[in-house]
Image (tube, rainbow, N blue to C red):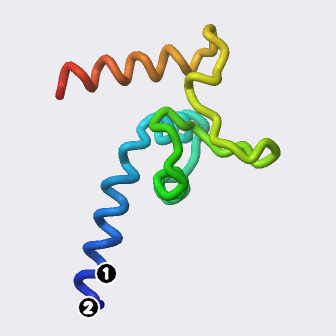
């Protein structure tokens, strides 16, 4: 594998991992650094986690998703607002 194709492969994985917007928004809300968010997104992609995954719960060994949160959880409103604003752009 050439060095160029290796970089292209990494870039493609990062683009695919960026589909995990709920995870990104969750971790930005909690003050996580970008490198940590990117790492978590890549882990979610590799594990084929649901797109609304927000973090991996080590004790239960599963991805916690927006849909797992209580209906009145404040993050749901933030996520819903984000999704609706994206739909207007797309």
Is residue 84 shown left or right of residue 56? left
Q: Secondary structure at mark 1?
A: helix
Residue identified by numbered label 2: 2
Q: Check the image and report above or below for 15 versus 68.
A: below
Residue 24 lies, with reference to residue 81, above or below; the image says below
- Nearer-the-camera pick, 27 or 23: 23
* Residue 48, x across and y down, in percent: 49, 49
Query: In the rendered image of this protein, does residue 17 appear above or below residue 88?
Result: below
Q: Which residue is mark 1?
A: 6
CA distance for labels 1 and 2: 6 Å
- Determine the secondary structure under disc 2: loop
Residue situated in front as seen by the camera: 33 or 11: 11
| Image marks 1 and 2: residues in contact by CB distance under 8 Å | yes
In this rendering, the count of numbered labels is 2
**Residue 71 falls in which quadrant of the image?**
top right
| Residue 30 rendering spot, x and y as whole percentages | 61, 37
Residue 86 drawn at (x, y percent):
27, 26
Residue in the image at 30% along x and 66% along y: 11
């Amino acid at each position: 594998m050439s060095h160029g194709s290796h970089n292209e492969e990494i870039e493609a994985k990062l683009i695919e991992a960026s589909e995990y917007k709920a995870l990104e928004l969750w971790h930005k809300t909690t003050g996580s650094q970008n490198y940590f968010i990117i790492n978590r997104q890549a882990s979610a992609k590799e594990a084929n986690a649901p797109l609304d995954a927000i973090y991996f719960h080590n004790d239960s060994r599963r991805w916690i998703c927006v849909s797992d949160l209580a209906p009145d959880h404040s993050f749901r409103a933030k996520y819903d607002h984000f999704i609706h604003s994206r739909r207007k752009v797309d």
